[in-house]
Amino acid sequence: MANDAVADNATRVAPTGPSDRDDPVRAVLAAYTQDLITAVDETLSTFLAAEVDALTEIDAAMGGFASAAREAVLAGGKRIRSTFAYWGWRGAVGGTEPLPPVLPALAALELLHTFALVHDDVMDASTTRRGRPTAHVALAAQHVAAGHRGDPGRFGEAAAVLIGDLCMVWADKLLARATITPARLFEVRRCYDQMRVETVAGQYLDVLGENDPTNWSVDRALRVARYKTASYTVQRPLLFGAFLAGVTADAALVTAYTRYGLAVGEAFQLRDDLLGVYGDPAATGKPAGDDLRTGKPTTLLMLARQLATPSQLRALEQADGEPVDRLADLVAETGAVARVERMIAERVGDALAALDSAPVDRTARTALTGLATAATSRRA
């Protein structure tokens, strides 16, 4: 792929048609890095084809399993993590450095993302993802169709956990194919490993919160957002890209990326909290209201409890069996939705302020400015 095509696309103005208003993230990604996304998908497809073939040689059944893993990776998605990593890299190296040497590393982040999604869906007992059955649901259906013995649901969950594990191993293998010096790869791996640790930490806190809601708070909900989402969605991918470029840990660019990444990443999760309650399932690909049904202590719900009047709080605490629409209205009546919207706007403002003083390539600054707004105002 021509490297300068990606950089040139970043100078275009994002389209403003009706479809873009429906999904501003896709509009901005299309305007800035469509060539990158195509290159990432092609890299993943080529890599996964060889991996599926290798597993099929072990046993024919492994071929079906590996194909299910491949489908989980390639079944849509905005490639947000590889995009932020790309601009983290491009912001440091400028517009002339060739992309192919670092492309495997950027694509590896999408394998890591699939690992997290598949495991998250098992833990949350989610039935749909991106408008399709989740991996464990699809595998359970295959179990039934094949007439196998045992519990299909248990089989589906076990196989999905293995798919997630396989995707993490695949991510490591693909990352190792980046054509950079060993010393630079070591720094990249340190960032990558920290991203994985923080993702697990955030996921555990998320699970703990659902099982210990009385000891939860807005601060702890934001901590979950910081580690479960902000770290591996925006902050660490940006730093990952910077280290791919050879930036040192004490550089001013690392400080700016850290501030920008945490702010945009938290705002991204806050938008997810709102979409989980008020989003259109046709756009999000997931059912609305699951967080309310389970009482998951998101920042939105914690704020609703904090801001509620005594009567509203009683209604929230006695909401078992209430229709989701009624619960959603009740949360909005507390003022929590408006508060979360302000929190999102404040974080986007902080992220843009971080870019103002950052020693970042001009084109990358333009792209990151657009992405900060698009990723936090999306409808899916």
Image (cartoon, rainbow, N blue to C red):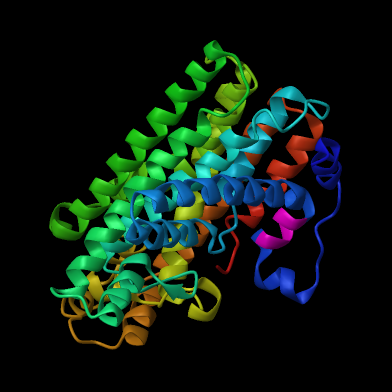
User: For residue 154, what is the image quadrant?
Assistant: bottom left
Q: Is residue 217 above or below residue 328?
A: above
Asked whether, in this view, residue 197 is left or right of residue 75, the answer is left
In front of the other: 261 or 342: 261
Examine the structure image and report whether residue 28 is included in the region drawn in magenta: yes
In front of the other: 52 or 34: 52
Task: Give the residue at x 54% y 59%.
Answer: 74
Residue 225 visible in the snapshot: no
Task: Give the residue at x 59% y 52%.
Answer: 45
Examine the structure image and report whether residue 110 is included in the region drawn in magenta: no
Q: Is residue 289 above or below residue 175?
A: below
Which corner quadrant holds the C terminus?
bottom right
Q: Position of residue 7 (x, y in %)?
A: 81, 39
Q: Main secondary structure of the magenta part?
A: helix
For the record, the magenta segment spans 26-30
Q: Position of residue 101 (x, y in %)?
A: 68, 28
In front of the other: 52 or 132: 52
Asked whether, in this view, residue 16 is left or right of residue 348, the answer is right
User: For residue 276, what is the image quadrant?
Assistant: bottom left
